[in-house]
Image (cartoon, grey):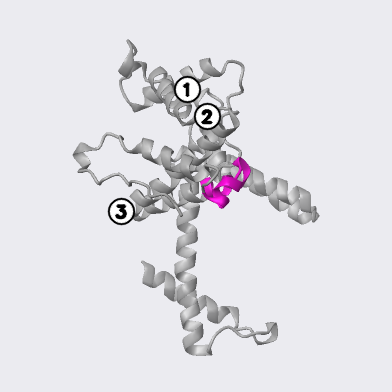
Amino acid sequence: MGRPFQIPEALPVEEQRGQTFPTLVELMQRLLAPDGCPWDREQTFGSLRRYVLEEACEVMDAIDAQDLSHLSEELGDLALQIVFLAELARRSGAFGPDDVVRGICEKLVRRHPHVFADGSAEDAAEVLRNWERIKAQEKGSRGLLDGVPRSLPALQRAQHMSDKVGRVGFDWPDARGSRAKVEEELVELDEAIARGERAAVEHELGDLLFALVNLARHHELDAEAALRSAGDRFARRFAHVERRVRERHGGFPGTTAERIPLEVLDSYWDEAKIEGR
């Protein structure tokens, strides 16, 4: 028979100081105890990796939806993953949840000398420059791009990389240079396609996408967000196409020979574009 667990009482927002966080650590320790949850006890750093990404993405979805109630729930799910991983590390003797919290507190104090020491920062841009300078001092000989996670979505990673090298002067003086680079990479992609070299096409396509990310950055746009919005628009418009196909054709045909002509589908697509304006 299981033992009961005391859930923290709900506090008014103005009275909350993070005092309930230790309860989450205690709960995770209970789940990982010898008489805890069999599933939790089987987990590893590797098995939890996918959940960290999924929960972070769900936090982002709640932010995009401006749903604060949902955001609260999803932040709890993400916090669980942090505590879960920290407790696995404590169990192996590597570090524990208090090391995680102390470490980020030390980092924040070091990198905010304008708040906690005698540094100065006139605006947000100077704060970022100071942050990168202090970070570089901390990392020593570590490469400028070593801190960009490889597991980031590819467009987001490319934008972080181009932003970092741009801050040290490895950049065009204005957006015209990045736009010319897009044209150059497009020509090279066309040439690779004409040669029929699959590996070269993949290479040049990657270069073109990277150049487009740089162009987005020069116009102060988020390439990842731009592509996400384009995907959302495509999904909405194609949903309209599907509705029209069901209404007028009974659905998409099952064979290639019976396919609905492209010009008909395009007309439904154009309807969706007009409705979306």
Q: Position of residue 34 (x, y in %)?
A: 55, 43
- Residue 132, disc: 1
Write the start and end of the magenta stretch as one range: 37-53
Tell me the quadrant of the picture where the C terminus can be found: bottom left
Crowding at dot 2, Cα within 10 Å, few <14 / some 14-19 / many 20+, comes out as some
Residue 234 sits inside the magenta stretch = no
The residue sitting at 69% across, 86% down in the picture is: 257
**Residue on which disc 3 sits:** 69
Q: Is residue 128 visible?
A: yes
Q: Residue at x 44, y 52 (%)?
A: 2
Give the foreground label among 3 and 1: 3
Label 1: how many residues lie within 10 Å, few (<14), some (14-19) or many (20+)? some
Image coords of residue 102 (percent x, y) = 43, 24
Give the mark, 3 or 1, whose residue is nearer the N terminus: 3
What is the spatial separation of the Cα atoms under label 2 and label 1, in whole angstroms? 9 Å
Task: State the SS at label 2.
Answer: helix
Which residue shows up at 51% across the image and 32% down it? 163
Q: Which mark is residue 14?
A: none
Quadrant of the image occupied by residue 119: top left
Q: Is residue 191 left or right of residue 217?
A: right
Q: Between 177 and 61, which is closer to the camera in this rendering?
A: 61
Magenta region, mostly helix, strand or loop? helix
